[in-house]
Amino acid sequence: MRGREPALSVSCLIPAYNEAARIGAVLDAVLGTPEIDEVIVIDDASRDETKAVAAARAGVRLIRHSVNTGKTRALEDGLRAARGDLILLLDADLVGLGASEIGALIAPVRTGRADMSISLRKNAPALWRVIGLDYISGERVFHRALLMPHAKKLKSLPKFGFEVFLNSLVIDRNLRVAVVRWPQVESPLKGRKYGIWKGILGDLGMLRDIFRTVPLWAIIRQIHRMRRLRVRAAQGKA
């Protein structure tokens, strides 16, 4: 009788910049998730105690940048360092995250029901909750092999171009996407973290990077195609 194939290993990548106040709770949830085999924090030259908080957690591998390079380059470094079959991406500022939410995000890909899973948080924009897809969510699980052939391309992407670039790979290959709802998890708005004006400028900068990576018409196409690629996440829920 043939034995079961070994479970796919999971590397969790957490890019972080000035998240000392929030990353500890995220790391506690990650370290309490048995499905995760490796945890890597990429500190993107934080000016607060982010790296100290991460370094104090046993089992966390810390990559430090001396210069702030942005999320895409941080994730590129994490991807090159990761050893897992699957990559779990998490933002460092999530509130209300627990092991059950993380496990639910991993499950569709690890069990073969989907090729990528993507979160839909409690405070995702209302339109995304209505259509059932947050196309730029920073919380995802996918096969490391999907992105590694394109690792060099990441160097040329804007700071916040990663998610829409990944979407294009998924769409080009007609991969199955599972949307996992996280009704208890929030990502603080930039205005709450940095103040109103800095938050507005941060959001505008992020949108600029997104549209530099993929034009607006292609973003609309991405949303349409990804909704059509959705599969059930688990137990009849999409």
Image: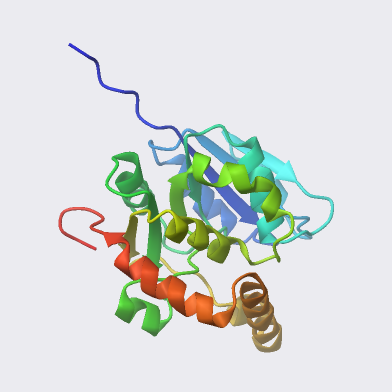
| Coordinates of residue 143 in the picture (x, y in percent) | 46, 43
Q: Is residue 237 left or right of residue 150?
A: left
- Residue extending farthest to the right is 66
**Colouring mode (rainbow / by chain / secondary structure / one colour):** rainbow
Q: Quick one: quadrant of the N terminus?
A: top left
- Please indicate, yes or no, whether residue 101 appears anywhere in the rendered image: yes
Q: Tell me the residue at 31%/81% (across/down).
A: 130
Which quarter of the picture shows residue 149?
top right
| Coordinates of residue 17 in the picture (x, y in percent) | 69, 60
Which quarter of the picture shows residue 6?
top left
| Coordinates of residue 179 in the picture (x, y in percent) | 33, 62
Q: Is residue 164 above or below residue 203?
A: above
Q: Is residue 66 above or below residue 223?
A: above
| Coordinates of residue 227 in the picture (x, y in percent) | 33, 69
The residue closer to the viewer here, 169 or 122, is 169
- Residue extending farthest to the front is 172
- Residue extending farthest to the bottom is 197
Q: Tell me the residue at 70%/88% (across/down).
A: 197
Q: Is residue 12 left or right of residue 114?
A: right
The residue closer to the viewer here, 15 or 164, is 164
Q: Quick one: quadrant of the C terminus?
A: bottom left
Looking at the image, how many numbered discs can be counted on the residues? Answer: 0
Q: Tell me the residue at 52%/76% (across/down).
A: 218
Q: Is residue 185 left or right of residue 108?
A: right
- Please indicate, yes or no, whether residue 122 appears anywhere in the rendered image: no
